[in-house]
Image (cartoon, rainbow, N blue to C red):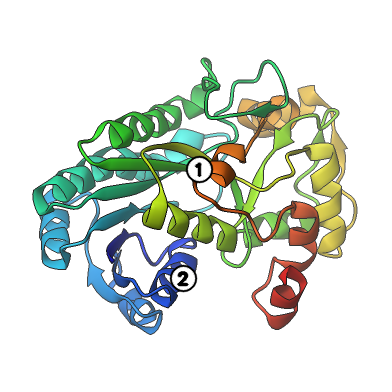
Amino acid sequence: MRVFVAGGAGALGRRLVPQLVARGHEVTATTRSAGKTGELQELGARAVVVDGLDGIAVGRAVAEAGPEVIVHQMTALGGSQDLRHFDRWFAGTNELRTDGTRHLLAAAQASGAEKVVAQSYTGWTNARTGGPVKTEEHPPDPEPAKPQRQSMAAIRFVERAVPAAPLTGIVLRYGNFYGPGASESMVEMIRARRMPIVGSGAGVWSFIHLDDAATATVAAVERGEAGVYNIVDDDPAPVSQWLPHLADSVGAKPPMRLPVWLARLAAGEVVVRWMTEGRGSSNEKAKRELDWRPAWTSWRDGFRHGLVDDGAARDARG
């Protein structure tokens, strides 16, 4: 198939493009930076420089590519991580999730594309009540932290607009990414002991290795039906379990512990909620309906062997 990957030079796009090419698809991939076109070409794609917020440019690029499927992987996380001012940190990505999605859907319809697969997220978005693991049928958090309200609205826009479009609209809710290009900043924080366990560390997180996120995306491109899917591994786990394991996996000292009141003062409400009240996500729908299985079924092995891109990691994964 002809596949148009918007945001092909991102952390996930760089893992996705070669998988699509290896399966015989003709891939056009976009980047905002002319300096990244060579990398995309080396991965086997036709590279196009385009700003995802320029509707005319997006429409022209899609029309020239004539894709059967469009994959929306555009993000814009710049600068240092800023969880206290989450919406400000995610402002560019939120624009791409709203205006960028509108442009791609309009271009898809104008060019006759049959399917759009769009990136979303599952994690802090889950309601902080009820059981520890949520499915796609559970409603999102009705009261996100104030610094995350705009980001939640942008995610909800993607999840409404794409499945409602007059084509096959698929939304993939990826869990917390790790792997080459995705987890270096977190590992750096852990080694510097700047990522403590807050309170009891009862907040549940779901992870997904970048390579597994890419294979799930390929599955959605090739055989997915309209709808929303959680793309996570098989092992949702509380912070009190995965954070010490990650520290040990990278040779760092055990994480410190911080009381809730002090963490709220030091890092803000977003961190406290995520660390203490988060809910994980189930991947059963994706496994059933996309016929997909993560190679890294648990972060336990993934953190040990999948943080770097080398032969040992591939051997460990099998």
Q: Tell me the crowding category of disc 1: few under 14, some 14 to 19, or many 20 or more residues within 10 angstroms, Cα based.
A: some
In the image, is residue 89 above or below residue 128? below
Q: Position of residue 176 (x, y in %)?
A: 61, 47
Quadrant location of residue 159? top left
Residue tagged 2: 19
Residue tagged 1: 289
Of labels 2 and 1, the one closer to you: 1
Q: Position of residue 275 (x, y in %)?
A: 73, 32
In the picture provided, is 257 more to the left or to the right than 150? right
Residue 180 appears in the figure: yes
Q: Amino acid at mark 1?
A: Glu
For the residue pair 205 and 215, the one nearer the viewer reads as 215
Residue 192 appears in the figure: no
Q: Amino acid at mark 2?
A: Gln
In the picture provided, is 118 more to the left or to the right than 168? right
Query: Residue at point 50% right, 27% down?
Result: 147
Query: Residue at point 80% right, 42% down?
Result: 196
Q: Position of residue 18 (x, y in %)?
A: 44, 74
